[in-house]
Image (spheres, rainbow, N blue to C red):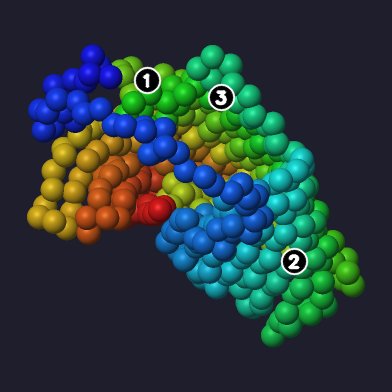
Amino acid sequence: DKDYLGNSPSTNFQKTKPITVKNFNQLYEKSAKVEDYSEMEHALTPHSWSFIGARGTQLGVSTQNYLNTISINAAIGEGVNEDGLFGNLSLSFKKYYPILSLLLDYQERANEIDQWSEASVGAGVTLPYTFKSGLYNGGHSLTFIANQIEVSNRRTQRIYELDSDQLFSKSIIFNTSFLKEMRFRELRPSKGVSFEAQYVDAQASEDESFSSYLAYSKLNLYTPGFDINHGFLLSLSSEYRMDDPFTYRITSPAESINEYAFSRGFDFEYVADWQKVSLNYILPISYPNKSFGRWLYFNRIYTNLYFDHTKTSTPRSLNSFGAEAFFESLTLRKIPLTYGLRYINRLEHGDARVELLFNLDVAY
């Protein structure tokens, strides 16, 4: 309709008068045969990949079918805490309620005197629920996981240690969150709460003394900061496990490649229990919009000020404070890579150091 034809280049670049098209309906109509999509349509086509995961450096890929009923995640890499190889594969079927999952995992483990490997196969059931209330998004999920774990031979096995045995692991995981939607350029939700709780029980088939359990919980509280896009994050976390260094060492959910389970600057230890309080204040520094040739582009710089306090059953009190600076970039004109510098001051030791960290998550 010429009455709705504008003069901008996007609507009338040639500045010509409208031309009437005869048989308009026949020109744009197209007959098509209706066919159902196959359940495996694009199910094996990767849509994202990454180099960094929660357990360490890795090469990970994710796929999902066209109907969003099947998803596959696979990764292989090296663990951050025990310097061993790991690999995992998970397949989820989400067409019906609840969500069903198949889990395969392999990892190399170590303690002070020995090294061994573990392979597991398992299944999971997840009951999800999501909702929205005004500007807040909420969600709950309850997951049950059962794993059969095979432990390899150990070179220095003692009479109270498991050697070439199997464990049956049962886990229950609960997650809930109620978070305000993030504004443009906001780094964290300005208001809200999230909570996670896990319980894992591992029973050895032959040597019951190797059986173990782990209970973990973490509460995050988000509040506004002193200026726009500033925010406070108060995290409370705790963990309890068997008070025996030679029982099965269940991997702590708090361990991550760029984060500390204990206060920043202190290595993780397998202790009977620990509790941690972490106060963080995050704020943007600048938006440089600066490129260095065609190789590096920085779009945002922000910082996180923190104080960590951890109490362990050893007993030890671990305290640290400092700051983290993050540089969001587009590296090599294509890779969204965030460079980070972390300054750590350990109060009990009276020392300070600077660490380099980075985060990479590429998706297409």
Q: Earlier in the sequence, mark 1 or mark 3?
A: 3
What is the crowding at mark 3: few (fewer than 14 residues within 10 Å), some, or many (at least 20)? some
Mark 2, residue position: 121
Up/down of 196 relative to 6, above or below? below
Up/down of 309 relative to 52, above or below? above
Amino acid beneath label 2: Val
Inter-mark Cα distance, 1 to 2: 45 Å
Q: Is residue 80 visible?
A: no
Inter-mark Cα distance, 1 to 3: 20 Å
Mark 1, residue position: 225
Amino acid beneath label 1: Gly
What is the crowding at mark 2: few (fewer than 14 residues within 10 Å), some, or many (at least 20)? some
Q: Residue at x 53, y 69 (%)?
A: 76
254 relative to 26 in the view: left or right: right
Q: Position of residue 42 (x, y in %)?
A: 55, 58
Residue 86: image quadrant is bottom right
Q: Quadrant of the N terminus?
A: top left
